[in-house]
Image (spheres, rainbow, N blue to C red):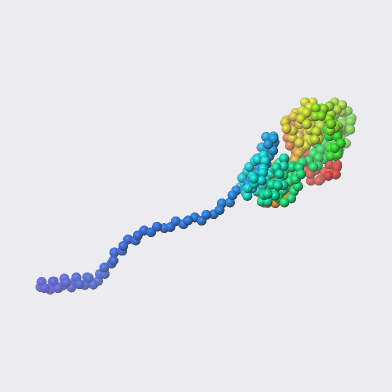
Amino acid sequence: MRLNFTFGLLALLILTGCTQTAQPTPEPALPTETPVPTPTPFPTPATPLAILVLPADMDQETSALYQKTVYDLCQANGYRFQVRNSLSITDLEPMLKVVIALPPDPGIAALAAAAPQTQFLAVNIPGITAGGNISILASANTRPDIPAFMAGYIAAMITEDYHIGMIIPKDNPEALRAVTAYKTGMDYYCGLCNPWAGPFYDYPLWVEIPAEAKPSEYPAYVDYLAVRYKVETIYLYPDIASPEILSYISTSGLLQLGAFTPEQDYNGWVVSIQPDEMRAIQTAWPELIAGKGGQTIPAPLVLKNADPDLLGLGKQKLAQEILNDVLAGYISTGVEP
C-alpha cells in the first residue's frame, strides 16, 4: 500500500514536469540616449534702412514734419530710419535702400553711383536731374502763375471792393506773368469786379521793387499801394518776401498772402499757397522701396496755414476746389504754361 502511494506521487511529479515549460527571465534593457536634432541655421535678413538728410539749420517745426513723414513710412514698411545732416560714401551700407535728401546737395550724383542698390530722392535740390537710381521732387514754384491766380481769387473773396494789390521784383518776366495770373484769379471770382464805393482804380494794382533797393526800403513800396491807392490785401512775390516787408505789412493793418510759409506768425496772414512736399514724398515712397528710380515727382499745391478768422472754412473748401481744377487744367490762369 505504501509502495503504491509512493509510485503514484512519483508519476504525478513526472507528469507535472512535462506540462510546464520554464520561461526565461528577461533582462532589463539598458536606457539609450535619444539624440537631440541640431537646428538648421537660417540666415536672418538684415532690416532695410532709409536715411533722411536734412540741413542743420532747418527750422524745428519743418524738420519735425519731414522726420515724422518719413518715420511713419518706415514704420509701416519695416524699415530702419535715420536722420542725418550730411551723408558720405563711407556711410553707405548694403541694406541702405532709400535716401531722401534736402538742400544743400550732399553729393547725390557720387553717392548714387557708389550705391546702385539705393534709391535717392532729391527734394528741391538745384542741378539734380532724374535718371538711374535718382528721382527728384520738383516742388519749387516752376509755375508761379498758379499760386498767383489763387492769390487773386482768394484776395478778391475776402477784400471789400476788391482793393487788392501785388508787390513784385522789377524786370522779372516770371513775376509779370504772375501779375497777369493774379488779375485773372480776381476776375474769375468776381467778373467785372465793380466796386461799390471809391476810390475807383483799376484793381488789382502792383508795384515793382528794383534789385538795388535795400530790404529796409521795402516798406515805402507797401505805403505806395496802401496809402496812395487804398490797397487792403497784398500778395507778395516770393523773391521779395523779406522779414522787413512781412513785418511792416503786418503792423500796418493790411492782409497778406503768399506762395510760402513765413518763418514766424504775422498778424493779417491769410493763407499760404504752396507745394505739399510731404504728400509728394508719400506718393513717391512705394516706387522708391520697389527700386524704381529716375522719376520726377511733382508736389501738389495746397492751401496751408489758413487763418479761419480771415478765410473761413467754407471759403477754404471752395478755394481748394478751384485750385484742384486749376491743377487739373480745367481752369486757365490766363498765361501759357
Left or right of residue 289: residue 155: right
Along the line of sight, the residue nearer the viewer: 52 or 186? 52
Residue 68 at x, y percent in the picture: 65, 40
Q: Which residue is drawn at 81% across and 46% down?
A: 329
Residue 273 at x, y percent in the picture: 77, 37
Q: Tell me where residue 90 sits by quadrant.
A: top right
Q: Tell me where residue 196 sits by quadrant.
A: top right
Q: Residue at x 70, y 36 (%)?
A: 58
Residue 284 at x, y percent in the picture: 70, 47
Q: Tell me where residue 251 sits by quadrant.
A: top right
Q: Which residue is drawn at 73% across and 46% down?
A: 136
Quarter in which the N terminus is drawn: bottom left
Left or right of residue 22: residue 89: right
On the question of residue 239 being in view, the answer is yes
Name of the residue lying farthest toward the left: 1
Along the line of sight, the residue nearer the viewer: 202 or 26? 26
On the question of residue 66 being in view, the answer is no
Residue 190 at x, y percent in the picture: 84, 36
Looking at the picture, does residue 226 appear above or below residue 284?
Answer: above
Quarter in which the C terminus is drawn: top right
